Amino acid sequence: MGPEVQEFETEFANYIGAQCAVTVSSCTAALHLTLHSLGVGPGDEVICPSLTWCSTANAALYLGAKVVFADICRETLCSSDAEIIRHVTPRTKAVIVVHYGGYPVDVNRLRSFLPKSIAIIEDAAHALGATYPDGRKVGSSGNPVCFSFYANKNLSSAEGGAVACDDRSLVERLRSLRQHGQMADAWKRFTHSQTVALAPLETLGFKANYTDLQAAIARAQLRRFAELQARRLEIASYYVSRLQSSAPGVVMQAAVSMPDHARHLFVIRLPIERFRISRDDFLRELRKRNIGATLHYVPLHTMPLYRRLCGVQKLPITDEVAPQIMTLPISSSMTVQDAVYVCDHMEDCLLKFA
C-alpha cells in the first residue's frame, strides 16, 4: 500500500458520499474484518439471506458466530424486513443486508425496526452505482458497507474490496486489522526517516491489504465509471423492454427506476412449470448457443456445510424461487446487438421447450 491506495480511498469515498473508505484484499475480507471489528464472536448470531454468495455467511462463521438465514422478498430477491425481524433474538449481534444483483435495499427503513445494539452491515458487492430510495448512493448510509472490485464487478481492479463507513474508530480498527495489527504499512515505514522498526504488536491482525497496482487500475476505472455504468443500464433497459413484450411468463427482479439499480446482475425467473425441461437444462441450451447465462445462486441453507454448521432452516420463498432463477449476461463490454442476440435465443428456447 502506498500513495495510489490512499488516493483511491479518498476518491472512492467521495464518489459514494461516505466519510471514509478502507480498501482490503477482497469483499470477503471486508465482511470478515468488519464483523471482527464489531466484536462478533462465539455465542453471537448474524442474520443474512441464503440467496447469496458464500462469503456473506462465511465471514460470520470464521469468527465462530452462528448464521441465521432470513427469507427473501419474492419480488426483489433481497431479504425481507419482516423475516429479518422475526429472527432477531437477544443473541443477534449483526444483520448483513445483501443488495442482490444491485437492487438497493432500504436500510433506513430496516434500521427503524431494529434495536440500535444490532449492527447493519451492507454486502454491496453487486451494488456500486445504485442509489437508496432517499436518492443517496449506496455506501453513504453510515453503516459499514462492503464492496467488491473482483474481475466481473461494475468497477474492477481484478481483485480487491473496500469498507465504506462514517465511524472513525471502526476505520482505524480496519486499517490495523488488514495488515497484521500494524498501523504503519511498509510504505510509511520506508518513507518516514524516523521510522526504523515495527511497532510492538498488540492485536492479532490479518494479511488483507490492497495494493498500489490494484489501486492505480481502480482509479482509472473510477474515472470511467459513469461511462461503464451507462452501458450496463442500456443493456438492462433493452432486456426489460424486450422481455416484457415477448417473453410471456418470465418475471424480472422488481423494478426500481433504472439509474437506481446498479444492474450488476440481470436476474429473471422462468415459468418452469410450463417447461418440458429443467431450469438447468434451459441454461445448458443457452450455453450451447454461446450465451453466458448462469445462476446466482444455489441457496446456502440447502448445502451440507451450512446445514451442519447452522442447522436445518426452512425458507419457503427462497426455496420457491431458487429453481426458477437464472442470470442473463450483462456487462459494460456488451453491445445492444449482443442483447438482441440473447433475447432472440431466449424467445426461441421459450417456444421450443414450452
Image (cartoon, rainbow, N blue to C red):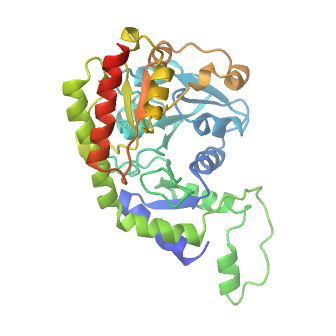
Near-viewer residue (200 or 293)? 293
Give the tally of numbered discs.
0
In the rendered view, tell whether residue 287 sits above or below residue 316: below
198 in relation to 210, above or below: below
Q: Quadrant of residue 19?
A: bottom left
Q: In which quarter of the image is the N terminus?
A: bottom right
What residue lies at 65% left-to-right and 78% top-to-bottom? 187
Which quadrant would residue 330 be assigned to in this image? top left
Residue 315: image location, x then y, percent? 52, 15
Q: In this view, does 299 lie above or below 143?
A: above
The residue drawn where x is 42% and y is 24% is: 80
Residue drawn 48% across and 16% down? 278
Quarter in which the C terminus is drawn: top left
Residue situated in front as seen by the camera: 250 or 278: 278
Depth check, front residue: 199 or 274: 274
| Residue 309 falls left or right of residue 276 | right
User: Is 280 displayed left or right of 25 in the figure?
Assistant: left
